[in-house]
């Protein structure tokens, strides 16, 4: 009985993960024989995934587990959330290093969960990877960006970057999905493919990407330097942009500028432009500029913001070139 009490005390201390209360089940079964014990344990563990098992000398079996698989619950919640309008999109400026003018934005997904509040993609994208839902979310982002940005006259020359996932790219309906959802945005669209995704160079993928290119869509290799197959990917697909992951800005001294210069030289050889992500300080902006990098994206230039904030941003960049707001949370998000 004391063991049982210890278990329940532990369960009370469990903290909810994003949309994931550990739905704890405590079962105590008593059996007089080994067969009975086995039967009881099978019944008790029917739908438990995480199990703490204790067999006591008197033949009691205690199972503590979460009844529903967390991933499945998150996916179901996201599917429902998409239907209920819990998702929204924020936009982060991408600036030209020479002029400091905004030349594009990256559309980033946010989930405003009714119970757990705002959640960045770090809390759910990984879990949704490899599911059809991520394709549906890409279409949602495109539709939102289309209706929001085509109404902003000052943004007509901006390119719009949208993150795509490998699974969607490998599906039959990828091209149709993108074209339908992007509408008039298509010719300004940049599809960002993260280097960490396992994209295979299958005929379907090659055909899909060349279809996109024919329609004027540009390609960007995201998070460069964080995956395993960066040079493979660079050689296999004709990227228009390569985005260097922000972790490289954390490098110290001369190594940082030498690294950025080498990446710029390599990428320029391939006819693409380099974007550095995660510029948070003026000093980083200067290093990036001295490295011959074309474009930058980071809090120092502008945080991800709601579409109405973009107007103010565009006005501010027109007069003071950059918005130096590195404090607080995302603008309007
Ligand atoms: P990403 O595509 O590399 O997007 C850039 C991330 O860096 C964004 O995080 C942005 O808010 C963050 N960031 C930008 N500048 C700075 C900075 O100066 N400092 C710091 N600390 N962070 C900065 P976010 O929005 O949390 O997105 C994380 C990742 O989630 C994205 O990385 C992307 O891989 C994925 N993601 C976001 N939206 C979508 C989407 O609609 N579809 C898919 N498939 N993935 C998405
Ligand atoms: Mg991206
Ligand atoms: Mg990135």
Image (tube, rainbow, N blue to C red):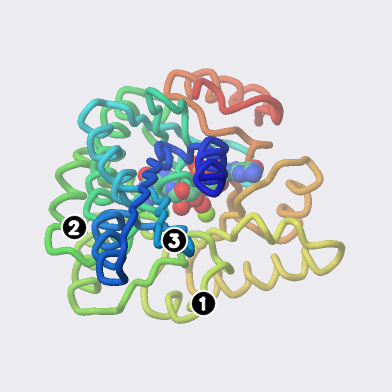
Q: Residue at x 67, y 58 (%)?
A: 247
Q: Residue at x 34, y 31 (%)?
A: 87
Q: Distance of mark 1 from mark 2, alpha carbons?
A: 25 Å
Q: Distance of mark 3 from mark 2, alpha carbons?
A: 59 Å
| Outermost residue to the right | 253
**Circles 3 and 1: CB atoms closer than 8 Å:** no
Mark 1, residue position: 228
**Tag 2 or tag 3, which sits nearer the N-term?**
3
**Tag 2 or tag 1, which sits nearer the N-term?**
2
**Circles 3 and 2: CB atoms closer than 8 Å:** no
Q: Nearer the viewer, mark 1 or mark 2?
A: 1
Q: Secondary structure at mark 2?
A: helix
User: Where's residue 286, x and y in %?
Assistant: 78, 48
**Tag 1 or tag 3, which sits nearer the N-term?**
3
User: Is the residue 192 above or below the residue 148 in the image?
Assistant: below
User: Is the residue 301 above or below the residue 270 in the image?
Assistant: above
Q: Nearer the viewer, mark 3 or mark 1?
A: 3
Q: Is residue 257 visible?
A: yes
Q: Quadrant of residue 316?
A: top right
Q: Residues within 10 Å of mark 3 (few under 14, many from 20)?
A: few
State the mark number for residue 128. none
Q: Is residue 161 visible?
A: no
Left or right of 234: which side holds 329?
right
User: Where's residue 273, x and y in %?
Assistant: 52, 60
Left or right of 177: which side holds 166?
right
Q: Secondary structure at mark 1?
A: loop
Q: Nearer the viewer, mark 3 or mark 2?
A: 3
Mark 2, residue position: 174
Q: Residue at x 40, y 36 (%)?
A: 19
Q: Distance of mark 3 from mark 1, alpha carbons?
A: 53 Å
Q: Secondary structure at mark 3?
A: loop
State the mark number for residue 58. 3
């Amino acid at each position: 009985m004391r063991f049982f009490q210890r278990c329940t005390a532990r369960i009370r201390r469990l903290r909810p993960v994003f949309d994931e209360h550990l739905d704890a089940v405590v079962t105590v079964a008593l059996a007089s024989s080994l067969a009975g014990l086995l039967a009881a344990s099978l019944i008790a563990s029917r739908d438990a995934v995480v199990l703490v098992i204790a067999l006591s000398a008197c033949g009691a079996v205690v199972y503590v587990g979460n009844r529903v698989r967390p991933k499945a619950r998150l996916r179901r919640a996201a599917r429902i959330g998409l239907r209920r309008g819990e998702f929204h999109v924020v936009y982060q400026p991408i600036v030209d290093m020479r002029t400091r003018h905004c030349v594009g934005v990256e559309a980033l997904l946010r989930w405003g969960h009714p119970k757990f509040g705002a959640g960045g993609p770090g809390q759910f994208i990984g879990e949704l990877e490899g599911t059809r839902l991520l394709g549906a979310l890409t279409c949602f982002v495109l539709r939102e960006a289309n209706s929001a940005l085509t109404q902003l006259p000052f943004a007509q020359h901006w390119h719009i970057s949208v993150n795509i996932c490998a699974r969607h790219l490998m599906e039959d309906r990828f091209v149709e999905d993108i074209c339908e959802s992007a509408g008039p945005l298509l010719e300004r669209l940049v599809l960002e493919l993260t280097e960490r995704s396992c994209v295979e160079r299958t005929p379907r993928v090659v055909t899909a990407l060349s279809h996109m290119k024919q329609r004027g869509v540009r390609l960007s290799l995201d998070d460069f330097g964080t995956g395993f197959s960066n040079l493979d990917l660079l050689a296999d697909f004709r990227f228009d942009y390569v985005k260097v992951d922000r972790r490289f800005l954390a490098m110290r001294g001369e190594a940082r500028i030498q690294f950025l210069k080498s990446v710029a030289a390599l990428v320029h050889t391939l006819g693409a432009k380099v974007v550095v992500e995660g510029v948070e300080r003026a000093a980083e902006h200067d290093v990036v500029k001295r490295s011959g990098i074309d474009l930058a994206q980071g809090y120092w230039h502008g945080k991800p913001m709601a579409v109405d904030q973009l107007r103010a941003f565009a006005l501010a960049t027109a007069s003071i070139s950059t918005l130096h707001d590195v404090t607080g949370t995302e603008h309007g998000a």
